[in-house]
Image: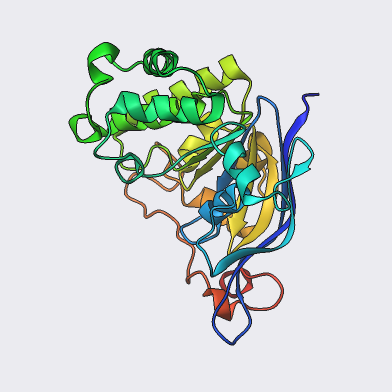
């Protein structure tokens, strides 16, 4: 069995609310990811998926956001306890992240090549020419057409799919042990989405990185996941292999998600309505005791 790269134990992420008690966004979350494994975290918007990734990276908005409890172990090193300087050295080298919207993550006034090369220079201290050579090599690996020309272009000159490929190149430039991908195919058409997912999978096989893929798209989960973690209102409600979650879900929320998936030629007929989960996710400061899904169950 492959070694554990990431172990999250009892993570609690909270936000200060003035004089009152903090609003808890993620509560008691635990999971592990092994080398070469893909874990998909799935759930509807606002369930805490992206906050989980930001907590792992310690990029919660300050001064209000904080990790209130728990441990985040990367190769048995607790990231909650390391200094800010140590964490800056870890980000981009041991852990990298692909964010949802590349246009808001890339610097609009720097060329693509410079942005990738700077990532390498910060973490590996190579000569600038070697950093640019690495940038060109990474652009080839992520299958950017005419990489020698694109190296000197700016983000606005690239398509959405190409910008996402650049984000993947930047994330993998220093061969991280763990890759966090937060909705990496949002706003891309189906053809480009499939290409991006194939690219992440191919590069994962080459590098052996552990991948945590955050998505609300169950089709992406079926395509990419080995294990699936289902979140609702900041809590883990179910976890299992992709076969267990899709074929025999046990939690009512998971069953509701599966029932809401469209199926070609399914039993509901071509004119039938998709199933829906009635109600709304409770607000952070108004969650019921016990199972947060109980009012919608």
Q: Is residue 220 visible?
A: yes
Q: Quadrant of the N terminus?
A: top right
Q: Is residue 18 found left or right of 235 in the rendered image?
A: left
The x, y position of residue 237, in whole percent, is: 67, 57
Q: Residue furthest left?
A: 157
The x, y position of residue 273, in whole percent, is: 37, 55
Q: Nearer the viewer, residue 271 or 51?
A: 51
For the point 40% across and 19% down, the residue is 135
Does 92 appear above or below 151? below
Q: Quadrant of the C terminus?
A: bottom right
Tell me how many marks there are: 0
Coloration of the structure image? rainbow
Q: Nearer the viewer, residue 297 or 95?
A: 95
For the point 75% across and 35% down, the residue is 75
Q: Nearer the viewer, residue 3 or 220?
A: 3
The x, y position of residue 238, in whole percent, is: 68, 52
Q: Is residue 183 found left or right of 2 in the rendered image?
A: left
The x, y position of residue 161, in whole percent, is: 30, 30
For the point 34% across and 44% down, the residue is 270
Q: Is residue 194 visible?
A: no
Does 188 appear above or below 251? above
Q: Nearer the viewer, residue 67 or 81?
A: 81
Q: Is residue 149 found left or right of 20 in the rendered image?
A: left
């Amino acid at each position: 069995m492959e070694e554990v790269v990431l172990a999250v134990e009892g993570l609690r992420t909270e936000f200060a609310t003035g004089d009152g008690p903090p609003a808890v966004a993620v509560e008691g979350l635990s999971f592990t990811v092994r080398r070469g494994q893909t874990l998909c975290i799935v759930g509807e918007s606002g369930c805490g998926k992206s906050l989980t990734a930001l907590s792992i990276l310690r990029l919660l908005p300050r001064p209000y956001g904080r990790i209130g409890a728990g441990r985040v172990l990367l190769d048995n090193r607790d990231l909650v306890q390391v200094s800010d300087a140590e964490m800056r050295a870890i980000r981009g080298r041991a852990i990298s992240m692909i964010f949802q919207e590349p246009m808001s993550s890339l610097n609009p006034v720097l060329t693509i090549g410079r942005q990738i090369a700077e990532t390498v220079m910060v973490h590996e201290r190579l000569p600038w020419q070697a950093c640019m050579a690495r940038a060109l090599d990474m652009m080839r690996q992520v299958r950017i057409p005419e990489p020698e020309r694109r190296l000197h272009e700016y983000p606005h000159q690239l398509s959405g799919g190409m910008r996402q490929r650049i984000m993947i190149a930047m994330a993998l430039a220093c061969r991280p042990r763990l890759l966090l991908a937060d909705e990496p195919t949002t706003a891309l058409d189906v053809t480009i989405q499939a290409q991006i997912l194939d690219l992440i999978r191919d590069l994962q096989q080459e590098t052996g990185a552990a991948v945590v893929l955050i998505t609300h798209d169950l089709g992406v989960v079926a395509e990419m996941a080995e294990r699936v973690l289902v979140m609702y209102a900041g809590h883990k409600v179910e976890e299992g292999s992709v076969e267990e979650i899709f074929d025999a879900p046990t939690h009512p929320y998971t069953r509701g998600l599966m029932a809401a998936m469209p199926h070609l030629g399914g039993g509901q007929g071509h004119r039938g309505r998709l199933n829906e989960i009635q109600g709304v996710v409770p607000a952070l400061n108004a969650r019921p005791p016990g199972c947060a899904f109980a009012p919608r169950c």
